[in-house]
Image (spheres, rainbow, N blue to C red):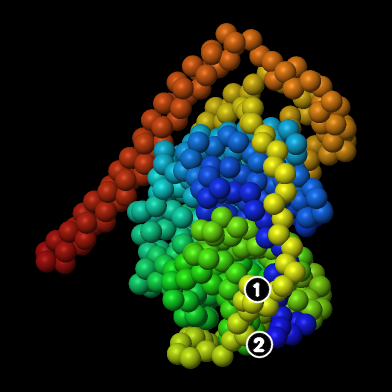
Amino acid sequence: MASAPEDPVLQRYFKGHKAAITSADFSPDGKQLATGSWDTFLMLWSFKPQARAFRYVGHKDVVTSVQFSPLGNLLASASRDRTVRLWIPDKRGKSSEFKAHTAPVRSVDFSADGQFLATASEDKSIKVWNMYRQRFLYSLYRHTHWVRCAKFSPDGRLIVSCSEDKTIKIWDTTNKQCVNNFSDFVGFANFVDFNPNGTCIASAGSDHTVKIWDIRVNKLLQHYQVHSGGVNCVSFHPSGNYLITASSDGMLKILDLLEGRLIYTLQGHTGPVFTVTFSKGGELFTSGGADAQVLLWRTNFDELNCKDVIKRNLKRLHFDSPPHLLDIYPRTPHPQEGKIETVEINPKLDVVDLQTSTPPVVDILSFDSTTTTETTVHTLPDKGEEICGYFLNPSLMSSECSPTTLKKKTEEMSDLPYENQRSIPLAVTDALEHIMEQLNVLTQTVSILEQRLTLTEDKLKDCLENQQRLFNAIQQKS
């Protein structure tokens, strides 16, 4: 069947990773794409013709999650090597390393204002970091199994998380408490996220389902059974009207949330698809999976003017504009089962002159500082860093530390010889490495003690409740 003008179209393949793609994110300006992979590398792709791709080398195990900061000046990554890294997305690729988790880290997520970062880990915790000071703030412990994903709400007041304990939890970032819990799952959720106006959450289920919940009334709004394999990732269109899903069945599906139905099935990958995401404006989306290919698609089906909808949603990021109950349609669950009418698009059949990008790849070795749970250790500053640390949030900087100033300094520094930029006496390096090893041991100890304290508190609470019941029972008998 020939594609209609409003159908999504595959524009480009990006090839450069050596193993499965786990995560992808568009830069806020829409000119670059960052991807993470099982090959332990991050890659930064430019949409300009004949542009080089950058491969960032630093993680020692699978990169599980990547995300640009809202201003695009930072790139965060999570890895199975138990660390989180912040990278400067340029040709120098300077990075800072966080070591706070005691098990693989599964996801990273910036708050909408860029001031905080949430990390989710297989150590059953979610940790929140202050990006301005690069300091650990607090942990959220209530999950009883690996946490696979944690995301901020658009206004930053909530965090949603999903775990292999088969629950989805909503956390209040003000009082650090779990304020809601969804647990009617056959399997567990691989991925979860808020819709653009923060009124609903969507979950990607290992039980092949996609569910959308209204968190204001704690009600299941929509339930889609459109995949024949586990769903690994979902992404809301910025308008909130569409949801795209990626599955181990090798398919991408596009759902029309206003009508509550499946509208497109996309076949572009060979093997499971692990990640999918819309660009910030919604005109593009990208997908990646086990075939180690990054696919760039043009959306097309959202040609209806959604800018007004996006503006309306942005207004709701402020505390004085709570979302309205009429914003979500339909108001009853819509299970999608049985034979479904959908437009199937197979680029291998439909597209003849597809542009394949295998750009020259520049390897960038990280030279980093490390942040542990409650201690920050910085390497010696390079030229121009005494005034402004590279990782300060530009929106919180003084004028002398503006992004423009930083850009000029970066350009100046990039002209220096490679050795001069990174020369540190060997004795100092050895001493710093020894200090970091000791800090890592302390970090792990503190984290374990934190977990034990949480468990002890829970047990003490149960004991007090049991004592109260026994006391009440004795009083009734007497």
Apparent side of residue 385 relative to residue 261 in the rendered image (left or right): right
Is label 1 in a helix, a strand or a loop?
helix
> In the drawing, what numbered circle is on residue 347?
1
Above or below for 349 versus 130? below
Apparent side of residue 436 relative to residue 297 in the rendered image (left or right): left
How many marks the image carries: the answer is 2
Which residue lies at the image location 70% right of the left edge and 69% below the top edge?
Answer: 10
* Residue 62 in the image, given as x and y percentages of width and height: 50, 45
Which residue lies at the image location 70% right of the left edge and 86% below the top edge?
Answer: 2
Above or below for 236 versus 107? below
Above or below for 373 versus 48? above
> In the drawing, what numbered circle is on residue 1?
2
Is label 2 in a helix, a strand or a loop?
loop
Furthest-front residue in this view: 352
Kind of residue at disc 1: Pro
In the picture, the quarter occupied by the N terminus is bottom right
| Most foreground residue, 291 or 403 | 291
> In the drawing, what numbered circle is on residue 166?
none
Kind of residue at disc 2: Met
- Residue 320 in view of the camera: no
Which residue lies at the image location 64% right of the left edge and 27% below the top edge?
Answer: 367
In the picture, the quarter occupied by the C terminus is bottom left
Furthest-left residue in this view: 478
Label whose residue precedes the other's in the sequence (1 or 2): 2
| Most foreground residue, 466 or 477 | 466
Q: Are marks 1 and 2 in contact (CB under 8 Å)?
A: no
Which residue lies at the image location 53% right of the left edge and 66% below the top edge?
Answer: 270
Apparent side of residue 217 relative to residue 230 in the rendered image (left or right): right
Q: CA distance from mark 1 to mark 2?
A: 12 Å
* Residue 4 in the image, given as x and y percentages of width and height: 74, 85
- Residue 5 in view of the camera: yes
Question: Image quadrant of residue 289?
Answer: bottom right
